[in-house]
Image: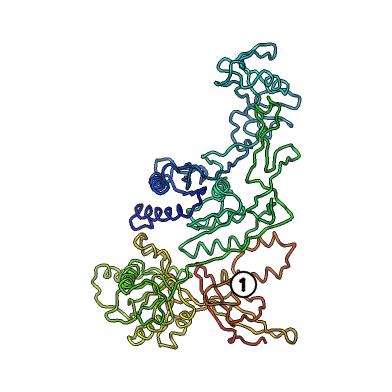
Amino acid sequence: DTWELGLHSYLTYLRDRLLVARDLLTPSGSVFVQISDENLHHVREVMDEVFGGENFVSVVTFQKASGAGSPAGGTDVLASVADYLLWYARDRDQVKYRPIFKPKASTETDLGAYTWIQTTDGSRRRMTAEERQDLARLPDGSRIFRADNLTSQSGVEKTKYPVEFEGRTFRPNKGVWKTSDAGMANLKRHRRLILLGDTLSYVRYIDDFPVQYVTNLWNDTIIAGYADPKSYVVQTATKVVLRCLLMATDPGDLVLDPTCGSGTTAYVAEQWGRRWITIDTSRVPLALTRQRILTATFPWYELRDKDRGPAGGFVYERKQNARGEEVGGIVPHVTLKSIANEEPPKEEVLVDRPNIDKSITRVSGPFVVEATIPTPMDFEGDGIEDSGAPLVAAEHGSFVERMIYVLQKSPVLQVGGGRTVTLRNVRPPARTLSLSAEATVHASAAGQEPTLSDVIDEAEERRGDRLALSGKPVAIVFGPESGAVTEKLVFNAGKEASAKSYTHLYVIGFAIQPTARETIEKANDIFGVPATYVQATPDLMMGDLLKNMRSSQIFSVCGLPEIEIVRLKPAARREPDRYQVRLLGLDTFEPVTMEAESLDAAEVPAWFLDTSYDDLCFRVAQAFFPRTEAWKSLKRALAPDYEDSVWDHLHGTESAPFEAPADGKIAVKVIDVRGNELMVVKPLSEAIKAG
């Protein structure tokens, strides 16, 4: 319901991304797409078109919810408790596949044909109904087994020999025996034969191969009461993503998730030694993922080649616990053939059971949060800020028209704390040099209901009866479609807004240069007109695919971090000056008074410091998370190695001391509660002396 043309827009969006994914994949690579049963067939048709039907691998059905108590939606139909994974290969003949396994028997697992037990005295009997329901009721030392077929439809005539067993002679009723006369003697010697009625059968113990191959039906991906905590309504369980990665990749391989969500793919890939890239158009999922990975702890898997790191593979060993159960990463696969021929059993590697060094707690390796770097545009054509981008005036005009249309459809600006600003009568200004639109404003506090006047205004606006702007209008200027809002753009718009007596200037953009933010903050002093920067969601880049609704949170008002730089006293003579940055707060916007307020620094979710900013790339030198409890689990895991002062520092609002950078410039980036990234750049010349 977020797409302008419904399913058609979604399939267009998906096809474009699958085409890119196909080109990016290695010849042995795979792509997995999660989808519900409603559009499974349509998505498969698109994937057949992009990858070719011959590269289809499997449809995996996995359980996403426990049994529903009543039909979905209260209707008289079956409730849906499963989703589907469409698995396609770049090249089916070269696809990388690593089989994965799951335990063959547990108290929750249906044992299937394994209904017999052998007790410690060697006697054999069928399980009781109570024992099948609860394996803990079995006598100590019991071995579970099944009676398996001992004949085959294909073989040679010499394997139709008679077999003497328990005073009777048996011949294969159909086909031939699965082994030779000597092999049958070995089976008999190892007590691997059992008589069921008139049929001679083979005894297959459940611990001959204590695991079973995972098929395309995953009914163990959710356990009632223990499901993954969800940040999104649509969120893939960790176990599902893990199986995809283990089946289709090796340690050191690169995994791409173009729909970040809560970062499950990045989290699983980080844990299992895969390199990863995750992408999203919204800052919120990236902020969630960043915190999730930064605060996570992982097991330390032993490396087969330490010089190569995870790319050299993990160490797997065969291990047994005190009860003789296989608990290691290598398990034996005892077969009728191996017993009959007295061969050592084949061994299988369980890729999800590498050796773990429990004396080491691993945290995330280094990773980078990046964005496309928007470039300044030369709207005036004077060559001053021309970056060479292929944006002509006609294209910019079309973009402005589209943005005005979006504002008319989604006129609500989110300002935090449940408060909003609603733009009325958005339209192009009559004559302008720098402005993009004008409107009137209605502000509401958290939980405030619209007034009768608001309803009338909306009705008149829809009918087109309102020919003139009511009240005092505000000015709007849009930044470039593929660039950052520049200082020059803000300056020109501010001058015109002042000259035309607008009461406020809204600067709307996808990104903004730090100098432009400073101009906006000082706009009231410079132009006599206050200004506010409004962050537009990158979803708008999707053009006509995205549905614009009044309920959409497309625009949000962003403040500016307030910081203080302190020059510390040298600890000794001839030591270089050292500095410290203090986060004082974050400016927020009060919609009723149209003035800036300040959010206390302790309420900021996260802030980062670049101690040597180069005006191009923000490099995190220090990171802080004042308003989060996510560090608690990490603190518990690493408590013996770090003092409380370390954790106090991570929660803090003051940086660690640092030496002056070569260019004398630092930058602070704050992540607000909506995931917006707000940055301020300051020269060290503004530092105050420590008291």
Could you tell me which secondary element the residue under label 1 belongs to?
loop
Look at the image and tell me in which quarter the C terminus lies: bottom right
Q: Residue at x 48, y 57 (%)?
A: 258
Instruction: Find residue 491 and report its image quarter.
Output: bottom left
Q: Nearer the viewer, residue 553 or 281?
A: 281
Percent x, y for residue 651?
A: 64, 70
**x and y percentages locating residue 436 in the rendered image:** 33, 76
Could you tell me residue 254's position as x and y percent? 55, 55
Foreground residue, 170 or 436?
A: 170
Residue that label 1 marks: 621
Q: Is residue 269 above or below residue 59?
A: below
Q: Is residue 638 above or below residue 235?
A: below
Q: Is residue 114 left or right of residue 218?
A: right
64 left or right of 163 in image: left
Residue 227 position in % (x across, y down): 56, 49
Mark 1 Cα-neighbour bin, 10 Å: few <14, some 14–19, many ≥20:
few
Residue in the image at 26% along x and 70% along y: 460
Q: Is residue 83 visible?
A: no
- Name which residue lies at 66% across and 61% down: 634
The N terminus - image quarter = bottom left
Task: Using the image, determine if residue 273 lies above or below residue 109.
Answer: below
Residue nearer the viewer, 421 or 149: 149
The number of callouts visible is 1
- Mark 1: which amino acid? Ala
Residue 122 at least partly seen? yes
